[in-house]
Amino acid sequence: MSSSTDPSATRIVSVKPLENKDARWLNLVQIEYLTPDGQTRKWEAIHRTTTPKTSPGGVDSVHIIAVRSSSSDPTKKEILLEKQFRPPACRVCIEFPAGLVDPNESIETCALRELREETGYVGEVVGKVEENIVMFGSPASSAAKTVFIHATIDTGRPENQTPVAELEDGEFIEPFWVPLSSLHAEVRKLAEEGFAIDSKVGIYAEGLEMGRLLGNV
């Protein structure tokens, strides 16, 4: 991958305070709430300004857990991850394909759109989307909500033979496949190499590892 598209070639130039009136995506808010002891207390939080009012359950974003059968062994599964530079972390992060829900867009449509835009792959959603758990990504600092969408990718489809991403201006994303059975070890290796591990990827990997240690995987 050339330096013009390699996420690791990104560099932080400066960091400075930002007033809410100048912010496009996020605002800092102060929440006042009454606790059981009768005290009124204050809490600082981040508010996402772009959440569509039409989004089911107020979901801001989707994360896609996409798998395919290994080309060397169809009985083995591989999971799709991404490398993307994240300025707050000041490094390249290991993430699931993900994105924000557009106005008047369903969760399923958003997931398939983001999957294709970021990786070039055409996937199929598995299960009933309405039964997926709505999760708060960081409830101590934000009310932003997300859902995991499970998807499969049929590499036999013509459009998945040589996938081409449709990245937006300023996006530099490198998709890659990891054996599902060794996800925990691969994520640990990537962390040791200096990559930031998105908590959702890390928790997913830890869950699989716990299941393996308990003999359920």
Image (spheres, grey):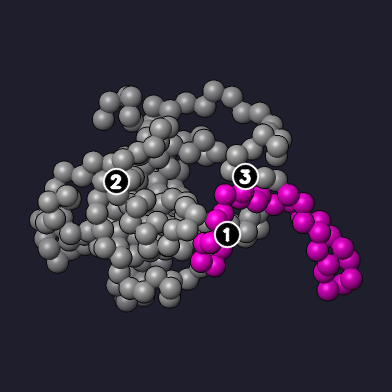
Q: Is residue 162 left or right of residue 120?
A: left
Where does label 1 land, which residue? 53
Residue displayed at 62% across by 59% down: 143
Q: Position of residue 95 (x, y in %)?
A: 40, 49
Say which element carries label 1: loop
The answer to whether the residue labelled 3 contacts the one labelled 1, judged by CB atoms less than 8 Å apart, is: no
Is 13 drawn above or below residue 96 in the view shown? above
**Residue 110 falls inside the magenta stretch:** no
Mark 2: amino acid: Thr
Residue displayed at 12% across by 63% down: 74
Number of marks = 3
Q: Position of residue 115 (x, y in %)?
A: 33, 52
Answer with mark 3 or mark 1, whichever residue precedes in sequence: 3
Is 85 drawn above or below residue 94 in the view shown? above
Of circles 3 and 1, the one toward us is 1
Report the disc number at residue 119: 2
Q: Is residue 69 left or right of residue 103?
A: left
Question: In the rendered view of the protein, which quadrant contains the C terminus?
Answer: bottom left
| Mark pair 3, 1: CA separation | 16 Å
Does residue 25 appear in the picture of this structure? yes
**Span shown in magenta:** 29-58
Report the disc number at residue 216: none
| Mark pair 2, 1: CA separation | 28 Å
Mark 3: amino acid: Leu
Which class describes the residues within 10 Å of circle 3: few (<14), some (14-19), or many (20+)?
few
Which class describes the residues within 10 Å of circle 1: few (<14), some (14-19), or many (20+)?
few
Mark 1: amino acid: Lys
